[in-house]
Image (spheres, rainbow, N blue to C red):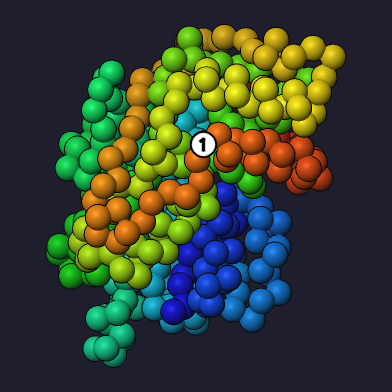
Amino acid sequence: MKILITGGAGFIGSAVVRMAVAAGHEVVNLDVLTYSANLENVASVAQSPLYAFAQADICDAAAVQSIFARHRPDAVMHLAAESHNDRAIEGPLDFVRTNVIGTAILLEAARAHWSELPAERQGQFRFHHVSTDEVFGALGDEGDFTEDTPYDPSSPYSASKAGADHLVRAWGRTYGLPVVLTNCANNYGPFQFPEKLIPTVITRALEGKSIPVYGDGRQVRDWLHVDDHADALLLVLQKGRLNETYCIGGDSTKRNIEVIRTLCEHLDRFAPANTPHADKIAFVTDRPGHDFRYSIDDSKLQAELGWAPRRNLAEGLEDTVRWYVDNGDWVEGIRQRGFHSERLGLVKA
């Protein structure tokens, strides 16, 4: 199978690229290479005859159409997105442009490509849209998100992803484009750009900086290792039922402050400082629209396709800390590009 993967130089996308190539699939990595993308993330497969890279913006219709015409993929896995909530607060229109307009342009290019395929290839074609559990809003103290949870996005980011989800379903229902969607839990693991919670804690601790905790740190998240997510995405792409949605969870819900303290304990072992890293924890003003709790019921995915996460959170956090400690050159490369783990997302009067 030849898969066109958008956003393949990003965190989740690169994990899918590496896994797909290892499984023997041809991969075309379409990425515009924004600030959080990094071709070093796919360096391990870059020389493979199964891998090709195409630099383009999904909002550039002509460029996207050209890539479809040149590579003639059997499937699309759409991961390209602006994804950081803090940045969405400061620049919401960038998120609307990429996540909504870009998705619509990609859908149209995919539809044109699909409509010209021979009947047999048309029947095998898939457009897999990768989304987030944040489109469902916040949970209270109990309950889980399911595929039937009503949409209730709280932030510009989650609203833009919700819009993209609705567009994908509309293209499936209106035009018959073979689509499938997934909504995932919070991802973590190697190669994650250090603006999200876990890599922020690790990299700031390694730099001797304070570790910011939004609000009281009692927010609850379901944590999914990126390799487990990539495995699920490829499985859904190949075997998921058309026009269906599958929720992908990590079966690992924890309060943010618990995760942060665990990371600090691992940092004390792998990169000891003069004082315990937890002493650097600083509670700061919460982010506007910060959802309280996420938790995913992924029983549909497990029952239909036999998938389950393989990596437990305790093991995954330890391995992630070790990876960042051992890959200082990768982190330094991020710093050299001008990112210094600064706080974003404060609403200015």
Residue marked by disc 1: 313
**Amino acid at pointer 1:** Leu
- Residue located at (55% from left, 64% from top): 19
Q: Nearer the viewer, residue 139 or 301?
A: 301
Residue 153, percent across and down?
29, 32
Above or below — where is 59 with respect to 282? Answer: below
- Residue located at (70% from left, 63% from top): 43
- Residue located at (66% from left, 55% from top): 41
Residue 218, percent across and down?
44, 15
Q: Is residue 244 left or right of residue 276?
A: left
Q: Is residue 219 left or right of residue 330?
A: left
Residue 312, percent across and down?
50, 40
Residue 10 visible from this viewpoint: yes
Residue 325 sits in quarter:
top right
Q: Nearer the viewer, residue 167 or 79?
A: 79
Above or below — where is 250 with respect to 253? Answer: below
- Residue located at (71% from left, 56% from top): 40
Above or below — where is 330 with respect to 321? Answer: below
Above or below — where is 340 with respect to 52? Answer: above
The N terminus lies in which quarter of the figure? bottom left
Q: Is residue 97 left or right of residue 173?
A: right
Q: Is residue 250 left or right of residue 52?
A: left
- How many numbered tags mark residues here? 1
Q: Residues within 10 Å of mark 1 (few under 14, many from 20)?
A: many
Residue 219 sits in quarter:
top left
